[in-house]
Amino acid sequence: MSGRARLTLCAAAATLLASCALLPLVDPATWIFQAVFLVAVQTGVGALTRRVPLARPLTVAAQALVTLMLLTLIFARQEAVAGIVPGPEAFQHFATLLQAGSEDVGRYSIPAPLSDGIRLMVVGGVLVIGLAVDALAVTYRSAAPAGLPLLALYSVAAGLSGGGAAWLWFLLAAAGYLMLLLAEGRDRLSQWGRVFGGASRAPGPDGAVAPVRTGRRIGAVALGVALVVPLALPALDGGLLDGTGRGVGNGSGGGGTISAVNPLVSLRDSLNVDEDRTVLTYRTNTAETQDLYLRIVSLDEFDGTAWKPAQRHIEDVPKSFPAPIGLADQVKRATIRTRIAAADWYAQDWLPMPYPASKVDIDGSWRYEPVGRTLVGDHGQNTRGVQYEVTSLMVQPTAEQLANAPEPSPAMRRQFTKVPESLPALVADTARRVTKGSANHYEQAVKLQDYFAVSGNFRYDTEVQAGSGSAAIANFLKDKEGFCVHFSFAMASMARTLGIPARVAVGFTPGSPQANGSMSVGLRDAHAWPELYFEGVGWTRFEPTPSRGTVPAYTQTDTPGNDAPVVPKPSSSASAAPSTAPSASESCSPQLRKLAACPSESSAAAVGSQDDDWPWLNTLGLALAGLLILGVPLLPMLWRMRTRAVRLGGHGRTEADVAAYTLGAWLEVTDTAWDYGIAPEESQTPRKAAERIVRIGELDPEASAAVHRLAAAVEQVLYAPHPRPVAGLANDARRVAEALSASASRPVRLRALLAPRSAVRVIWAASTAWTTLGARVSARKETLLHRPSSQTP
């Protein structure tokens, strides 16, 4: 392997080793496979362009162009020309994804979900660092400054993640950089020839000379010092190798904001199992368990790509919660107590509770978010094996109270009726059509619920193919197939377009009764439902998903002006037998699994995540097809550039080397003239050919003298008994090429560059090789057929 090839591989390896520090930041870490593939393609393009060779800036530009096209293929193929060429729409889509990714980075705790925005930021960042490292270390042959982008990549990851494995990521990043320095040093050392280090010093078993072995030892010692010395020094919080806390608040006080806001990010892997495992068991002092939904958190922010929990202020858990917002004294309610036990494998940051809770008795480090009335674990606290008691209210409004609810406050409307401009008009149009003739918001809400559950002919199906972004809601309304995520997200969005404050709640349906009087909540009880706000009642649950959960009683009572049909109320759980519905692993396609919207997973994941989960074979095939489409037309130009570099490059000092070099320089001149329309005539002598090139090409005196010097050198090689080397032949050939280009028109110059006529020599060479191969095969057959027998008569 050549020194440059070794340096190229080491640059790519150093980038990938440093990028391993990003692995703890995102879950799942499957993005690393995409990064490896894309870095490999980026590195291969750099190696090919350097072999041509191209100018250094052109090499970097070619790598950047191919990298951009591959990112377009993976993240914005629907907005690109032919799926790979980025245009204005593709760049706008990139900007949208980056904005969503930056919001997710600030919103989620470590590890964050692998949304499209975060995936673009991580993979794109690795590619940018890889391009910088390859350009500095290989293209510009300066490996030491390449450590700066590697350090930037590692520092960002180390500053965010921390943890007990930080030393491993540092070790990998440092090893990659040292390997890159060693490869460059070895390459530079080899250019000096043999290193004299004394008669008794021989190369090692691997061919490494003494300075190389010394470099390895220095690198190993430096790496050891970097790892060991900090352990003996006084530690500072947040140090490079120091693990950091994972709290959601600022310190131990009562302030701070929530950063771990996705309710089932920590559950995504745990819930993705084949069997319907038990998540929670509980006992309650009410027999009306059909409405006892265990709510985890609410998603109250819709940015056009996904419903997400807003970033909220959190505080210490109060002894008793304040009265629910919007709940008037006239509304009937009952106080219930529920004793809940979480499974010892169930690790969830948010605490499932009946809504609205008024008091929680629980041990551990928990914080209170007052707007959503939820509890979130602090500094690593989760629900694994916890037992707690919740005192909550069972609010029982009447249809009349909901129908007569006054308009919500301006602040409530401003915060919870906001919809993005990117929301398709079909959503609002459908909402107005379905609720036409309604006298108030309550009638509109009931009609929306009945439209999804009964009259709209929607079908509950976990195998539905979802779209991307806000278009997913429009696709759902057209296809009329989906599951709880789609139903709840669509109803909440449509309610907001009607001016009804709405959000989406995530949690569990009541579960199944057990023989001992308790209730069991399994993975398949995970659910999402819309909550609509009515002044005087507060946040009110609706159930648009058919065959899931229970329809609230206050939506089934006929009121004046309400012509919606009465919906039969299914039981909360028919029996304790396992559900006959297919499990998430059996019925959830890879696209839906990526949406994190399977019944056994959290419905809090964004329905707007793009269904980019194409098979890798298709992605690889499209990438290769794109490279071929762009590369094939450029092959003649690349062949000429490579041939010119070989002909005019360095050569040996023997007579044979001098002769080959001289003939190569002359052939380059005749081929260049051919590219500009002066076809060669093999019957002419070099002197006559030079005169013809000067005449037809209208060369200036300096270029004419260069052509004649080349012709004289060729005649000396052909006819002199001992040809002498002539200096400056390569410069003469380049001077002739510049003169031919200067005297030609722009179309002629473009053709000479992009479609050189002399490239036909490739076809001639292939034809000659094919003829030679056929002759050899025929001769071999003839020999085998006429071989005399070894047997004697």
Image (cartoon, rainbow, N blue to C red):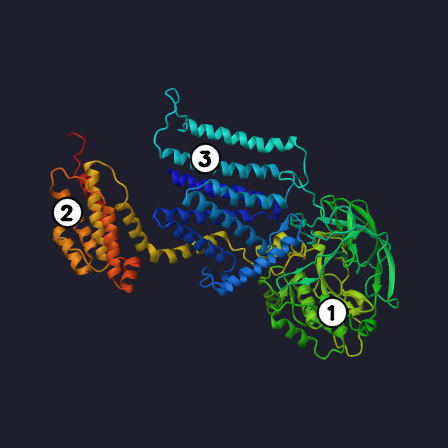
**Above or below 429: residue 588:** above
On the image, which quarter does residue 373 sit in? Answer: bottom right
Counting residues from the N terminus, which is met first, the one under dot 1 or under dot 2? 1
- Give the x, y percent position of residue 687: 13, 51
- Give the x, y percent position of residue 533: 77, 67
Frontmost of labels 3 and 2 is: 2
Amino acid at circle 1: Arg
For disc 1, the neighbor class at 10 Å (few under 14, some 14 to 19, many from 20) is some
Task: Judge from the rendering whether residue 765 lies leftward or rightward of residue 522; answer left or right.
Answer: left
**What is the quadrant of the C terminus in the image?**
top left
Amino acid at circle 2: Ala
Q: Nearer the viewer, residue 54 or 605?
A: 54
Disc 1, SS: helix
Q: CA distance from mark 3 to mark 2?
A: 47 Å
- Give the x, y percent position of residue 717: 15, 42
Frontmost of labels 1 and 2 is: 2
**What is the quadrant of the N terminus in the image?**
top left
- In the picture of the structure, the residue carrying the numbered disc 1 is 413
Q: CA distance from mark 1 to mark 3?
A: 63 Å
- In the picture of the structure, the residue carrying the numbered disc 2 is 712
Q: How many marks?
A: 3
- In the picture of the structure, the residue carrying the numbered disc 3 is 182
Which residue is most to the top? 200
Q: Is residue 675 visible?
A: no
Q: Nearer the viewer, residue 609 or 757?
A: 757
